[in-house]
């Protein structure tokens, strides 16, 4: 396959769709979390957050499986197998009769979604590197960010005309469409001659190469801490906006508003990254995020965790704009030195960043106490840790 098809509009949209399955599987659920938890007998109000974190747990484990497997059997077969697991998880959720059952379904669904998420990134890395890869990933993420803008509204609409189970029927259809499109339209990006035999020795050797590289490891954890803030928001946004601020009917619009901030940032990044470089743009955005979060934390504390809705909205829009400048660049920086073992590198990087995000964002999300203080403090603290980690990694670049 030549470089031109890799950069075609169809390829970018397909990779965006494969990545978007993760966002769609999360964001469409948000308006329904309270209803699902109540109907299936969740014990605690904060337990609804486990519907999100269970998906991420499956995603983390699946990342370790599908990445190296795609290095051995090819990108397309690995993604199709993952989509089959995703469909099975969707069916379990569709027919759930209690809260533990839907968590199991979400775990299986997340495990399957790991394949299109992580292997599609390896598909991009098969043909691009450096700032060029960052540009492609920014374009992919820009298309991908249309999902958070639209998905909560789709979920809200489904709840108005049907039940929450129909949402999982939609997930099932999405997985089938993505699988057929990939299999029929996309050429294999990893030819047989470049594949690595699936063996324990090969896996350990590749893993050792990933773990020994300070830039790859540093920016992997940086990605995790950055996404950890997003998990805090995902887990608590329905409680904050629908319940704390009484915006239940407008929740989908607020979510779309903030997602538009991330999409705008990714468009800006795609335009500027080739001129200014991904490290310079990332450093400016990260410092802005840390300063902004620290300032708004002080405001939130002075107002006892209940700042005006307009102030919270302004903070989140600015914070997500900064985050949008980080996501694509951090991934590209982490994988740039790993071209020879892109699948394994994507697996290790994706699993570690997801585990870091779950561990930090999930724990902080469970601290929700009816105020925005845990969320804002999480943004500030994780932003500061990200700044320290990236400074450490950059200092050790060769």
Image (cartoon, rainbow, N blue to C red):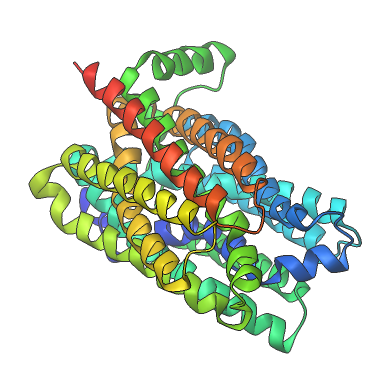
Residue 338: where, in percent of width, then height?
33, 26
**Within the image, what quadrant is residue 177 found in?**
bottom right
**Within the image, what quadrant is residue 91 found in?**
bottom right
Left or right side of 80 for 74: left
Residue at the far front in the pictured view: 302
Looking at the figure, which quarter contains the C terminus? top left
Residue 131: where, in percent of width, then height?
19, 42
Report if residue 6 is visible in the image.
no
Residue at the far bottom in the pictured view: 161
Left or right side of 99 for 306: left
Instruction: Name the residue at 61% across, 83% down.
Output: 249
Q: Is residue 146 above or below residue 374?
A: below
Instruction: Name the residue at 30% across, 45% down.
Output: 291
Residue 361: where, in percent of width, then height?
56, 43
Front-most of residues 129 and 381: 381
Instruction: Name the residue at 32% across, 58% down.
Output: 321
Left or right side of 72 for 236: right
Left or right side of 296 for 26: right
């Amino acid at each position: 396959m030549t470089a031109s098809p890799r950069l075609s509009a169809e390829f970018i949209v397909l990779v965006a769709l494969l990545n978007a399955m993760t966002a769609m599987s999360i964001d469409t659920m948000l308006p329904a979390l309270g209803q699902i938890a109540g109907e299936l007998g969740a014990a605690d109000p904060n337990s609804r957050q486990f519907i999100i974190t269970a998906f991420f747990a499956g995603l983390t484990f699946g990342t370790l499986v599908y990445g190296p497997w795609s290095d051995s059997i090819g990108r397309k077969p690995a993604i199709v197998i993952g989509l089959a697991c995703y469909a099975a998880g969707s069916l379990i959720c569709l027919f759930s009769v209690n809260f533990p059952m839907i968590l199991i379904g979400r775990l299986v669904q997340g495990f399957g979604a790991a394949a299109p998420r992580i292997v599609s990134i390896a598909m991009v890395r098969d043909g691009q590197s450096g700032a060029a890869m960052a540009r492609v990933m920014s374009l992919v993420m820009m298309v991908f960010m249309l999902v958070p803008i639209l998905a909560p509204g789709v979920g809200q609409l489904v709840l108005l005309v049907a039940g929450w189970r129909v949402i999982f029927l939609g997930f099932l259809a999405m997985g089938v469409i993505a699988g057929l499109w990939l299999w029929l339209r996309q050429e294999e990006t990893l030819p047989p001659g470049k594949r690595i035999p699936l063996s324990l020795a090969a896996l350990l050797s590749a893993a050792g190469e990933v773990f020994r590289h300070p830039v790859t490891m540093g920016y992997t954890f940086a990605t995790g801490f950055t996404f950890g803030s997003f998990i805090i928001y995902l887990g608590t946004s329905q409680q904050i906006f629908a319940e704390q601020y009484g915006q239940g009917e407008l929740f989908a619009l607020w979510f779309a508003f903030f997602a538009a901030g991330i999409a705008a940032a990714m468009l800006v990044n795609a335009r500027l990254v080739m001129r200014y470089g991904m490290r310079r743009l990332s450093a400016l955005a990260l410092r802005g995020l840390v300063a902004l979060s620290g300032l708004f934390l002080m405001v939130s504390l002075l107002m006892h965790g209940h700042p005006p809705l307009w102030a919270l909205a302004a903070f989140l829009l600015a914070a997500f704009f900064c985050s949008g400048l980080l996501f694509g660049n951090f991934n590209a920086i982490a994988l740039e030195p790993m071209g020879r073992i892109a699948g394994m590198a994507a697996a290790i990087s994706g699993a570690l960043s997801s585990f870091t995000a779950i561990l930090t964002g999930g724990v902080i999300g469970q601290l929700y106490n009816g105020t925005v203080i845990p969320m804002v403090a999480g943004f500030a603290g994780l932003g500061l840790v990200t700044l320290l980690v990236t400074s450490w990694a950059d200092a050790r670049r060769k």
